[in-house]
Amino acid sequence: MVAQAYTVAFEGVEARPVEVQCAVSAGVPAFAIVGLPDKAVSEARERVRAALTTMAIALPSKRITVNLSPADMPKEGSHFDLPIAIGLLAALDILPRDEIAQTMALGELALDGTLIPVPGALPAAMTAAEEDRTLLCPAASGPEAAWVDSCRVLGAHSLAEVVRHYTGDAPILPATRGEATDGPALRDLRDVKGQERAKRALEIAAAGRHHLMLVGTPGSGKSMMASRLPGILPPLAPREALETSMIHSLAGLLDQGGISRSRPFRQPHHTASMAAIIGGGRGAKPGEVSLAHNGVLFMDEFPEFPRAVLETLRQPIETGEVMVSRANAHVSYPCRFMLVAAANPCKCGYLSEPARACSRAPVCGEDYLGRISGPLMDRFDLRIEVPPVAFTDLDLPASGETSTAVAGRVAEARQRQTERFAAYPGLRTNADAEGALLEEVASPDAESRELLLRAADRFGLSARGYHRILRVARTIADLAGEPELRRPHIAEALSYRLVSSSES
């Protein structure tokens, strides 16, 4: 007779239900796992055998077959250990078959039967809730899974504890959710002396989720300002926190089951590979663009990234989604992030200072920023120069606005956008508006339209650049609390469009 247990297989951020069918029959003694298992799943039979031995449970001298259905779906990961173990115990009539059939389990087994936490407990809990099943997982993964209110989560420390629960000897209490944290301490924008124009651009970018390019000499404060961006961003809404946490759960980044209210801030090194940035590798795992979903992706020394890596950013920036395609995996991850890039004006970094520039100036600047293609540069909504800070300014006491004050204006602007796009699922900020909707919410008056058309003709703006200026102008108007676009909003938005030699 066949016993059933249930678990999940991960495809992107989705957890697909998998039925674990266990059959014990007469024949040559064997323990086979079928259904497209990878190496980690195939090795589960040895971990399960050893864990059962420590509990003084000997497998019978019969043929044991475990089928992972649907059989044509690839199965990867060590989280199949626990469902295989409880399915086998049900087939041996040690555990009640009916209760096991109503359980969705995941967890890795140590050789002594201890349950080891695995990534993906949060999306697994969502699937268990949809299937109306109880989720059984390692105790360390329980606080993470318990964030799904509609799912009953049982967290066990060992396989022996699982057996005692289902036999009624020592029931396991339902897991409680982890703590919601505010993330690490945030740096204050008030620490930045001078650079008022750059700080204004930072505020606009945060308010509308606009992509920002900072170009300036070494030491001008580009990285310093970017690191203070999280301090002016609004906290994650409940829906955004769940979306972001599901991705971080798959990557194993949730700390003790806690969910952060702070928006993610990812800053990969310029030596990062394409798989690290976009996603891929074994199991097509999420990359930095997806780990920055609903947050910020800061890429310092932007031209130093490999050209192929930079070009792969173009499609995710436009669609907010990335498809990772491999020979045995085709998964989609959300990646609605705000890209902040920092770059020196040239290789030596001092193109704007003739006394310090190298002998190849100004050709070195054209060559260096030329590593960024025109189509990619055109996707930045705001592009500004960050001049060096005068030494006299460094001696002055901090006198600028605090991050709290700027964050208040950003939150008000975001609230206006939330109300504006309430009837459009998936749209949250001005950066998301396009087509007829953009024309409706960002329609300039006659005077502003004339200015915009003249600028588009003079600077050769692309259609994409034209629409991005409208989005930025709409955000500037939101920060000012004005319902209509006027000439000052368009003029300021135009001032943030640097004309790069690499732009077509």
Image: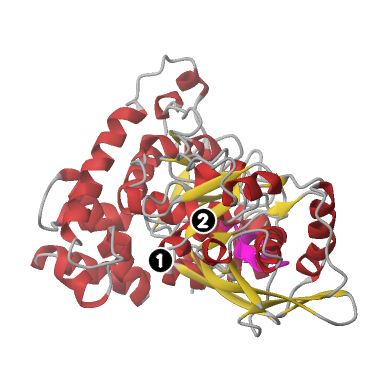
Say which label, 1 or 2, has the lower sequence index.
Answer: 1
Q: Secondary structure at mark 1?
A: helix
Amino acid on which the number 1 mark rests in the picture: Glu
Q: Nearer the viewer, residue 366 or 39?
A: 39
Residue closest to the far bottom: 72
Q: Is residue 266 above or below residue 394?
A: below
Q: Residue at x 25, y 48 (%)?
A: 414
Residue 157, percent across and down?
Answer: 65, 41
The magenta stretch is 273-288
**In the picture, residue 352 is in which quadrant?**
top right
* Residue at figure coordinates x 30%, y 63% from the top left: 469
Q: Residues within 10 Å of mark 2 (few under 14, many from 20)?
A: many
Residue 282 is one of the magenta-drawn residues? yes
**Residue 123 visible in the displayed image:** yes
Q: Name the residue carrying label 2.
A: 135
Check disc 2 and report its element: helix, strand or loop: strand
What residue appears at the point 26 percent right and 41 percent down from the top-left corner?
411
Q: Which mark is residue 130?
A: 1
Q: Residues within 10 Å of mark 1 (few under 14, many from 20)?
A: few
Residue 151 in magenta stretch? no
